[in-house]
Amino acid sequence: MHQIQDQRKVLASCFKRIGRCTVSCILVLLTQFSLTLVPHFFPASSLLIQLTLSVVVLVFVLGLGRCCRRIVGVYTSAPALVLFNLIFIWAVYIFIVRQAIPYFINIVFNIEVTLLFLGVCSILSSDPGLVTHGSSDANKLIETEVFGVEAHYESSALLKRVRYCKSCKAYIKGFDHHCPAFGNCIGQNNYVLFMILLVGFLTTEASYIVCSSQFSRGSQILDGTWFETDLAGSLVVSTMLFSLLQVIWQVVFFTWHLYCICFNIRTDEWINWKKYPEFQLVIQSQPGESFTRVMFKNPYDNGYLQNVKEFLSVKG
């Protein structure tokens, strides 16, 4: 009886994952083909205008998709969205853009995409620094709940930065944030891999922008000569605009994490520092004042070089 129930649960979980992946694939196709409307109807517009219109289309399609998903009751998978978008752009490159790209650059780009796929698959199943029940680390944790966020503070330098992730419902060493795009927490054990992946996405997207621009110039797409009736040309420009938008926000995201590494602070700690006692510097009130001030301090900042060295030397 129990075996039958377990099998039903496994089947239900599989069908749920298949459903979410299917919805994610449909949403990616809808989004990417909707973006082709921008270069199709505004071929002579400036890059800034096309980027702005692309943002409007993305917001509209994603908002419409969210409403439909709520009605149907089937939701998307963020990692599947990442992978399907990557596959779509790779397909556009292979079937359209590649013909205008030199042989060596073609090999380099395909290697970049392949490594990116391997990196994404690796981080999906990576251990961010999970503190399991019954482990020596778990037994030493001192739990303190403040506003629904649990912090753990102990004399050990290792356990000072163990935080609780509500999404994973687990304790993570060196917790930075929960990344929906990768369906995993980013913590002590996979932070380096996460940064490598950010660099990988930036370089791959930048390479695609260069390649698609070269194809567009060679085919005179950007001048609007045969653009209005050509789906292939629309796909090249729309995926180039999509990649450019990705690069813009990822550069900001990457810069933020470089800052965190240089100053040895996590995203969660920066946002929720008032909930973690070690980041609070209490300044006593002056004579005649009836209040005290709480200011931010970073007890883990040991200088740029030492912080970077600590980041690179962390082992799971």
Image: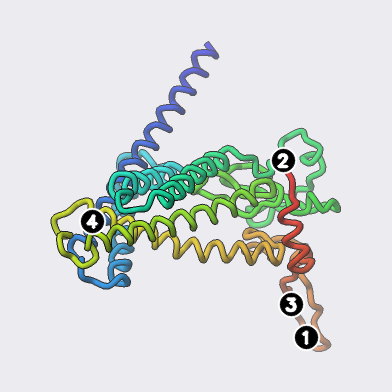
Q: State whether residue 70 appears in this view.
A: no
Quarter residue 129 falls in:
top right
Q: Which amino acid type is shown beneath numbered disc 2?
A: Val
Residue position for label 1: 289
Q: Residue at x 69, y 62 (%)?
A: 265
Mark 2, mark 3: which one is toward the viewer?
Answer: 2
In this rendering, would 102 be left or right of 194?
A: left
The amino acid on which the numbered mark 4 sits, given as a three-letter code, is: Ser
Residue at 64% x, 67% y: name it: 259
> Where is residue 209 drawn, in percent x and y?
38, 59
Mark 4 or mark 1, which is nearer the start of the sequence?
Answer: 4
Q: CA distance from mark 4 to mark 3?
A: 58 Å
- On residue 20, the disc is none
Name the residue tied to disc 2. 131
Q: Residues within 10 Å of mark 2 (few under 14, many from 20)?
A: many
Tell me how far mark 4 sits from mark 2, CA to CA: 49 Å
Mark seen at residue 293: 3
